[in-house]
């Protein structure tokens, strides 16, 4: 059986204001953490001479992230798009993704980015793996395959751990695991003209309406706004000894040290 890897990606909002900000190619981008996951997945699929499928959930305007992923090297893309998927929290999202992955079976590996740049929960990967009933390893640096098993190295805090697992396996990729490749212009044209995106709705996934969207969500986003970062720079003059004393005094007054 040919090696099959599935990568779940997302179009993340760039400029949010109010509730339910729309996502399209002007207001959103491919999640930067998913780009790293795609690179890791492509490297694995290339060594295994296998196929890579990308999967995303969102409105039709979010199909651009699938085309970008296919330009990087994915064989095909699946868009999970249905008005009833709107307002899904991480639980409802993982329910939809898991149903789509089951339909794409057989598969050996399911890969997610470490988190998303907008909501930043890191929940979807582990929740999807739980729904699928397959092992999940987070923070992965390397993943080496031999036959139907893999050796995974992960980084957590200041520790490195090594796991040996049999497929199918799910993992999230550590943000420092690799550097995503550049996309040649010819590959962009190829993704739009020679590769295919299929769209699946609620009925295609054989899911009940009460398990997706707002009905299937246990949490609700009341608002979404850009976080303001206020920083200022202060120069300390005088001899080195004076600068050091003033710096320590400023840090102490800020409460960072006692």
Image (cartoon, grey):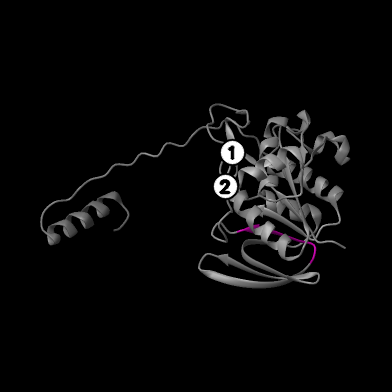
Q: Which of the 4 image quadrants contains residue 71?
A: top right
Decide: few, some or many residues near mark 1? Use Cα within 10 Å; few <14, some 14-19, many ≥20.
some
Of residue 153 and residue 94, the one placed in the foreground of this image is: 153
Helix, strand or loop at mark 2: helix
Q: Is residue 182 above or below residue 165?
A: above
Q: Is residue 183 above or below residue 21?
A: below
Q: Position of residue 185 (x, y in %)?
A: 61, 43
Q: Main secondary structure of the magenta part?
A: strand
Residue that label 2 marks: 32
Magenta stretch, residue numbers: 167-173
Residue 9, can we see it?
no
Q: Residue at x 36, y 39 (%)?
A: 230
User: Which sits in the foreground, 244 or 152?
Assistant: 152
Look at 23% across and 51% down and name the residue there: 250
Query: Where's the C terminus, which quadrant?
Result: bottom left
Q: Which residue is mark 1?
A: 29
């Amino acid at each position: 059986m040919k090696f099959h890897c599935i990568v779940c990606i997302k179009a993340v909002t760039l400029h949010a204001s109010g509730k339910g900000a729309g996502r399209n190619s002007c207001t959103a981008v491919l999640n930067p953490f998913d780009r790293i996951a795609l690179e890791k997945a492509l490297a694995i699929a290339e060594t295994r001479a296998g196929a890579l499928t990308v999967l995303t959930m969102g409105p039709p305007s979010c199909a651009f992230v699938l085309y970008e992923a296919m330009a990087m090297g994915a064989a095909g893309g699946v868009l999970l798009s249905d008005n009833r998927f709107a307002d899904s929290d991480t639980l409802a999202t993982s329910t939809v993704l898991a149903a789509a992955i089951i339909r794409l079976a057989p598969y050996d590996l399911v890969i997610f980015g470490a988190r998303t740049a907008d909501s930043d929960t890191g929940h979807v990967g582990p929740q999807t793996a739980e729904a699928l009933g397959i092992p999940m390893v987070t923070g992965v640096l390397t993943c080496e395959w031999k036959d139907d098993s893999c050796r995974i190295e992960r980084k957590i805090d200041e520790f490195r751990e090594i796991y040996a697992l049999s497929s199918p396996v799910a993992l999230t990729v550590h943000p420092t695991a690799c550097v995503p490749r550049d996309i040649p212009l010819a590959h962009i044209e190829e993704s739009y003209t020679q590769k295919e995106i299929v769209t699946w709705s609620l009925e295609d996934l054989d899911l009940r309406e009460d398990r997706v969207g707002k009905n299937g969500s246990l949490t609700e986003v009341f608002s979404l706004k850009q976080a303001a970062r206020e920083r200022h720079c202060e120069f300390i003059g005088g001899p080195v000894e004076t600068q050091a004393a003033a710096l320590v005094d400023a840090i102490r007054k800020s409460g960072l040290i006692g």
